Amino acid sequence: MSLLAIDVGTTGCKVIAFNTAGEILAQAYDEYPLIHPQPGWSELDSNVVWEKVSDGIRQVAAQTKMDPIEAVSVACQGEAVTPISKSGEILANAITTFDFRAAGISDEINQRLSKLEIMQITGMPLSGIHTLPKLIWMQRNQPEIYRGTWKFLGFEDFVYHKLGITPVVDYSLAARTMAFDIVQKRWSSKMLDLANVDGDLFPDVAPSGTAIGEVSPKVAQALGLPNGVVGVTGGHDQPCGALGAGIIHEGDVMDATGTVECIAPAFDEPVINEGMIDGNFACYPHVVDGMYVTLGFVSSGGVVLRWFRDTLAQAEVAQAEKSGQDVYDLLMEQMPDTPSPVMLLPHFTGSGTPHLDLESKGAIVGLTLSTTQGDLVKAILEGISYEIKHNLSLLQDAGVAINEIRAIGGGAKSEKWLQLKADMFGKKVVALDVSEGVCLGAAILAGTAIGKYPSVASAVEELVKSRKTYYPREEARRLYDEKLRLYAQIYPAIREINSQF
């Protein structure tokens, strides 16, 4: 048998079948375009998204005939919802996270409820990125679409709907709407009344890992699935990735390094205070029942290293192609053992938390004629890590426990970067043998729901294995603490200049 996990991202979707040992049996990936009807707008055509997801399901189902799929669970991006009519028609594109048409509406909301009051209910820092302000915008600017909507579905519950299952959204994804009470675990009448939104426009809610029905026979036949595949609530992609990294205890932190670098600490009780608000840190249900997570991120993570490779490292690219070596290994071999003499602000696509400054730009400070390529490569790794260290420090100051860092993603393959992180963070960093953390987390939820694992904890113990542990070196930690004080001055010093570019 096998477990099907679907990850619906912002620009592409993955469909992966795992066996109960956590091994990948089959997988598919495809991309879809973001649509930008106006500057600052960002949408997805949900018809196209479903076309890519359904194609992926067909591909994977065809490769798992000997290990038939028994359950499916969905992880997905947050905030974006698709308006669906009673007859099942998609009425408009889904408005994605980083669409800023509703920016001014959040200010209106703030006039009626304070940021602290909003976070005490929803766990979300007040922002126009969330679903609720966008629905207010739709009421005013697309009233015919709003009036014709039967349900607003996130991409998790949208996929269940397309599979012929009554749509249900899990707590973690519901929270990303800024309309969900994270303590009472239900849609917030106070937030809905404030926005004049009928709660019936949202689907029912359930904890992650809840069996919610079976794929309809008609849909199963069309997709090549066996009859009786059970749909199981999944979650927001980052908490699913945290589960896939084994983040099931308070103080454990996922560090996922990809295009964006994201950390996700887990904790047992909600942490809601001014420190969390000032850092733009959410507090919302984990996909692990009874726990909560927050997120900190650097908008430009590994993508900055890719920029350097493509722009300034053509000789190493050619050498890697000729020798069969990894180009990043070649670049990192040149790095000095001590902290780089130059510093890089990795805001190539704006900043992440805590500032959420989309106008910020990247910068390299301290260049001289003696600066080497290795100095620049190390400055990139350090700049990304300085940003994460700043987030970790702010979270600790706000009352979030930070104990062990568990690393997944492309950056987790680099021993030099992991040791750098351990030194800078002053924390143990554990590299995991997990290649597809988000989908593995969804598969764990699916398997536990149908009894393949006794519990989520037992599944994590069986499936999530560490590859190597890195410990902070005292002298390097001391040097980075000194350098961090200098790094922290760069963004405020050039913020005004950057805004003029």
Image (spheres, rainbow, N blue to C red):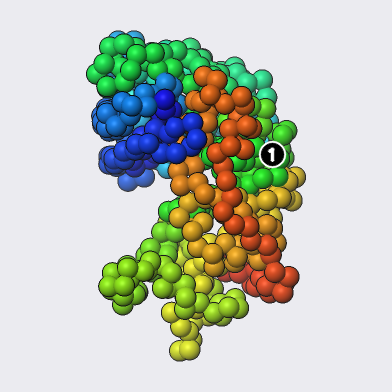
Q: Position of residue 97 (x, y in %)?
A: 43, 39
Between residue 469 and residue 131, name the one nearer to us. 469
- In this orientation, does residue 37 appear? yes
Q: Residue at x 54, y 79 (%)?
A: 336
* 181 relative to 367 in the view: left or right: right
Q: Secondary structure at mark 1?
A: loop
Q: Which residue is mark 1?
A: 249
Between residue 499 and residue 248, name the one nearer to us. 248
Q: Quadrant of residue 264?
A: top right
Q: Position of residue 54 (x, y in %)?
A: 29, 27
Q: Position of residue 175 (x, y in %)?
A: 56, 29
Q: Quadrant of the image for the C terminus? A: bottom left
Badge 1 crowding class, 10 Å Cα cut-off, few under 14, some 14 to 19, many 20 or more, is: some
Q: Amino acid at mark 1?
A: His
Between residue 116 and residue 373, name the one nearer to us. 373
315 w.r.t. 39: above or below = below
Q: Quadrant of residue 44?
A: top left
Q: Residue at x 38, y 63 (%)?
A: 306
Q: Residue at x 49, y 59 (%)?
A: 413
* 233 relative to 388 in the view: left or right: left
- In this orientation, does residue 165 appear? no
407 w.r.t. 181: above or below = below
Q: Position of residue 497 (x, y in %)?
A: 48, 67
Q: Quadrant of the image for the N terminus? A: top left
